Image: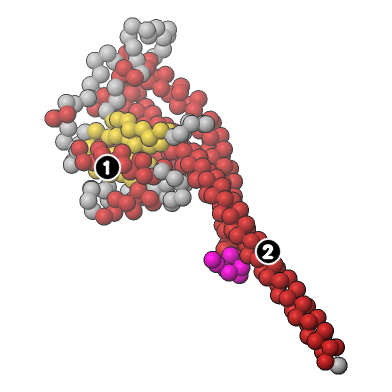
Amino acid sequence: MSDAAEIKSRINSISETRKVTDAMYMISSVKMRKAKREIEKTTPYFKALREELGELLHYIPENKNRYFQILDADGIVGRALLLITSDKGLSGSYNHTAIKAAEKQLKEHDDMIVFPVGEYGKNYFANGRFKVAEGFSYSAAFPTIWKAKSICSALLDYYNNDVVDEVDIIYTHYMAGRPEECKSICLLPLNASQFYDSNDFEIPFGKEYYPDPTSVLKGIIPSLLTGFVYSALVDSYCSEQNARMSAMSTAGKNADDMLKKLKQEYNGIRQAAITREMTELTSGTKALKKMREQAKRKG
């Protein structure tokens, strides 16, 4: 059994750790609310952009744009994978789930290049087992439109220069009140049916595109992809903060359980010590009384 001083030291240490977990929980909560507000501000713009793309495709029924050229699996010469992780741990299974999904794809396609967002994913794939894009380094913290635009530009450089024929993305989808979901989606090439259905589409009246629909389509695609990357970054960031809140909450409950047990043990040791002191005091009093009685008899 540990002595009282050691238990007291452990109680103080765990109490300090409990304060840290509470602080991390509150910080993650604030970060998540801020990220959700930011994506709410940009959602209407990218929704309108998506609808505009649907109208554009109506004017280009025979679309031969490279962004829409879906190749057979045998015709794909290279693949890119945008993997979104966090910059640090202490977030439960958040990073592990995303990396596991990425490794599954990488083992299936040996020509795949990893574009890791977040220090956790970057450090994990730094061992050289898989090919990582050179010079690609982005933090997962505080996602912005400009960061998404820069990431999208790097991916499009590989795609437009025929280094890769397919771009996938793995991110974690945030669902309030439910466990996060790791998603794997093909970012490029695009599928026209995602934006346009000729059976349900009504021809917009009096709309013209300058200089022509094909040129406008070429310019609108990067903005659309930037919007999707941005939403994935924010979605993952919210999921990360939610996972960290859950991890810190669990850690706090475990700390409370440990403190409860340690305090019971500490109180037991103190009670035993007090009982022992009282027993020794009583025994000493009795011995002293007996000695006095013996002295009286002799006297």
| Amino acid at circle 2 | Gln
Q: Position of residue 175 (x, y in %)?
A: 48, 31
Q: Could you tell me which quadrant the N terminus lies in?
A: bottom right
| Amino acid at circle 1 | Glu
Q: Nearer the viewer, mark 2 or mark 1?
A: 2
- Vertical position of residue 29 compared to residue 210: above or below: below
Q: Could you tell me which quadrant the C terminus lies in?
A: bottom right
Q: Nearer the viewer, residue 36 or 18?
A: 18
Task: Classify residue 227 as left or right of residue 292.
Answer: left
- Vertical position of residue 191 compared to residue 289: above or below: above
Residue 111 quadrant: top left
Q: Nearer the viewer, residue 221 or 47?
A: 47
**Residue 3 within the segment the image draws in magenta:** yes
Q: Nearer the viewer, residue 142 or 4?
A: 4
Mark 1 surroundings: few (<14), some (14-19) or many (≥20) residues within 10 A? few
- Vertical position of residue 135 compared to residue 103: above or below: below
Q: Tell me if I can see residue 135 in this picture.
A: no
Please report the bounds of the magenta region as a residue range.
1-7
Q: Position of residue 43 (x, y in %)?
A: 49, 28
